Amino acid sequence: MTGLDRRPVAATDAALPRGPLAGFAAGSLGMGVWVTVPGLLLLYFLTDVLAVGPWLAGLALLLPKIADVLLHPWVGHRADVEQTRRGDRRRLLLVGCALPLAFAALFAVPGGLTGAPAAAWVAVFFIAGNLLFAAYQVPYLATPADLRIGYHERTRLMAFRMVVLTLGILVSGLLAPLLTGGDAATRDGYQRMGVVLAVGMLVAMLVGVVGIARLRGSAVDPTPAGHGGWSALRIALRDRQFRWLVAAYLAMSTTTHLVLAGVPYYAEYELRAPGLTTVLVAAFVAPALLVTPVWLVVARRVGKQRALLGAQGAFAVGSLVLAVGRPAGLPVLIGAVAVLGVAFAGMQLLPFSMLPDVIRAATTNAGTATGAGTYTGVWTATEATGAALGPYAYALCLAVGGFVASTAGESPVQPDAALAAVRYGFGLLPAVAMLAALLLQRRYTLDATARTTT
């Protein structure tokens, strides 16, 4: 079947071979570093190491993400063009493998820069990193829609990816604070962390490129790709099911990145133990390694939509416990974070496996292949927007509370309002945002049909 053949291709229930699956999933190990470390440490790096005020720090993280709203759909269009002309998207993936260079530079702020100049340095390399991440992520996540596989096999494929992504999030989330110097983090420590993790990112992303090639060359045949462009973008934006799924995922992404950005502050100012940052990250991420197979089973039994609604509700309840703070007791708080982690695993696996369901349904309804890259570009732009809005929302909470920024080694006394902002921004605000995600997700109605026809 050629790249110019536009006939819809029926999905099958054939199982993908484990070897290529593992290779594909390996790419998420490197992606997990970019997803995690800037969200976990960059806001804290700006306010407590580089003496950038919280409002400016939040702005430095938000503005680069605004560009992603335009860049990611464009990258998706280029991915579809590559698929049509060359039969694969490998060139974009290889361009994206330059991401580790931008990651290392992000934390290598010259010693003389503080305040606004330091924020500008971070913003420039954050923009570069986001573009390179899009070049890798968009064709990577378009892979499930390129393969002639069924509803449940798409979930299995993304479950492999989710387990490895979680491993990348967990390892980088635990190592990054330690490599920076822990409680005595320094500029040199952040620079060392950036270089060490960048090397690991590069290796994992290259393995992922090879894994995708093997997956596409396995017994499962790729489906034809659409031409992309503005017409494909209009089709994606007019797709009602896609719009509701994207809206719900924007709220989910914003909420999870808000929580991630608040972890160092919650550990230091609410729990009064900066070293607990690592414990909280582990409690948030580690459950996914155990429960992802459980979410896979649940999705098979009740469907992806109902499983996802359950994950969203659990996240909201766990967040309300965190809003109580120290009076709840450390074991209860760590348990609440673990509940968030269990829900987080579902919210990573299920929406990403629903996206190819939407693309497949659009192809079937239109009678012609849609631009999987364009759909995926809009999706990753949404994820990037959430990754920016989350830290920015938390930074605004800190700014409203009068949080005092500082350089490394300083310990300013924070006003009571700032301490309250740390707690409520970490607990109450995520609960409200996740409730909004749940209400939006209820408007998605494709799942029952997708289970039987795609």
Image (tube, rainbow, N blue to C red):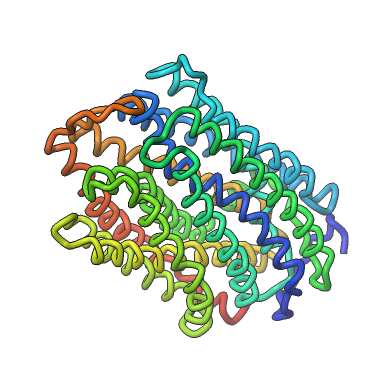
Relative side of 91 to 274, left or right: right
Looking at the picture, tell me which residue is in the foreground, 75 or 413: 413
Q: Is 294 left or right of 391, judged from the image as shown?
A: right
Q: Residue drawn 28% across and 27% down?
A: 410
Q: Residue at x 64, y 38 (%)?
A: 100
Q: Is residue 66 above or below residue 153?
A: above
Whether residue 304 is visible here, answered yes or no, is: yes
In the picture, the quarter occupied by the C terminus is bottom right
Q: Residue placed farthest to the top in the image?
A: 112
Measured from the top left, where is residue 359 in percent x and y? 62, 62
Between 133 and 18, the one nearer to me in the picture: 18
Q: Residue at x 72, y 55 (%)?
A: 208
Q: Is residue 244 above or below residue 296?
A: above
Residue 39 placed where, x, y %?
A: 44, 43
Of all residues, the one furthest to the bottom in this rendering is 301
Residue 333 lies, with reference to residue 135, above or below; the image says below
Q: Position of residue 30 (x, y in %)?
A: 62, 50
**What is the quadrant of residue 225 in the picture?**
bottom right
Apparent side of residue 364 relative to residue 307 in the rendered image (left or right): right
Expressed as whole percent of the image width and height from the top left, the position of residue 405 reads: 28, 27
Q: Is residue 448 visible?
A: no
